[in-house]
Image (spheres, grey):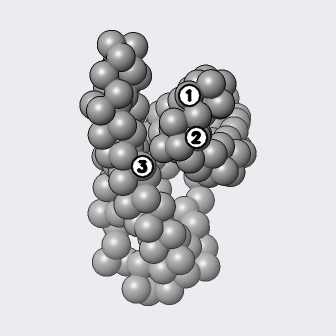
Amino acid sequence: MPRHTAGTNFGEGLTFLPLLNAILNAFTIIFLVLALVMIKRKNIKAHRRFIYAAFAMTIVFLISYLTYHTLAGSTTYFGEGAMRTIYYFLLITHVLFAIILLPLSLFTLANGLSMDIPKHKKIARWTMPIWMYVSLTGIIIYFMISPYY
């Protein structure tokens, strides 16, 4: 049974990218938590730096993710029973929230950079937990599908 669908043979040399993606997601979570701690302490300068770091990790992740899936295709999940249900629930919610996260994070960033603090706070209350969920589920999904790479 094939593990990958679509893509080309070029993807075979890129099997390290899914692990890299999980690592990038882990760093994103760390930076988001530190950004949250810094804003709670009213340290705007440090908060901004950690948000930039989280965005950098996310951008590198996106490049890596698109590269891998363009060249290697998709990996089939062969788990059964409850684990299959959990996997697909996490995958579907991960993808849906990731789609929502892109414009949400950009609006949040724009409001923060323009120092429109009321709007920034209002939207960040949604952006932060969604971004954390997407990053965390990305790691969980990696561990669930990694035996099939």
Q: Are marks 3 and 2 in contact (CB under 8 Å)?
A: no
Seen from this angle, which residue lies furthest bottom? 9
Q: Which residue is mark 2?
A: 111
- Residue 57 numbered tag: none
Label 1, residues with CA under 10 Å away: few <14, some 14-19, many ≥20: some
Residue 48: % across, % down:
36, 37
- Residue 117 numbered tag: 1
Q: Are marks 1 and 2 in contact (CB under 8 Å)?
A: yes
Say which amino acid is labelled 2: Asn
Horizontal relation, residue 148 to residue 41: left or right:
right
Horizontal relation, residue 8 to residue 86: left or right:
left
Say which amino acid is labelled 3: Phe
**Residue at disc 1, secondary structure:** helix
Viewer-side residue, 8 vs 98: 98
**Residue at disc 3, secondary structure:** helix
Q: Is residue 66 above or below residue 40?
A: below
- Give the residue displayed 36% in from the left and 53% down from the top: 56
Horizontal relation, residue 68 to residue 20: left or right:
right
Residue 77: % across, % down:
58, 52
Answer whether residue 78 is visible to the viewer in this image. no
Viewer-side residue, 13 vs 55: 55
Between disc 3 and disc 2, the foreground one is: 2
Residue 146: % across, % down:
42, 50
Q: Earlier in the sequence, mark 1 or mark 2?
A: 2
In three-dimensional space, the C-alpha distance between marks 3 and 1, rounded to whole angstroms, equals 19 Å
**Residue at disc 2, secondary structure:** helix
Say which amino acid is labelled 1: Ile
Q: Are marks 3 and 1 in contact (CB under 8 Å)?
A: no
In three-dimensional space, the C-alpha distance between marks 3 and 2, rounded to whole angstroms, equals 15 Å
Q: Which residue is mark 3?
A: 55
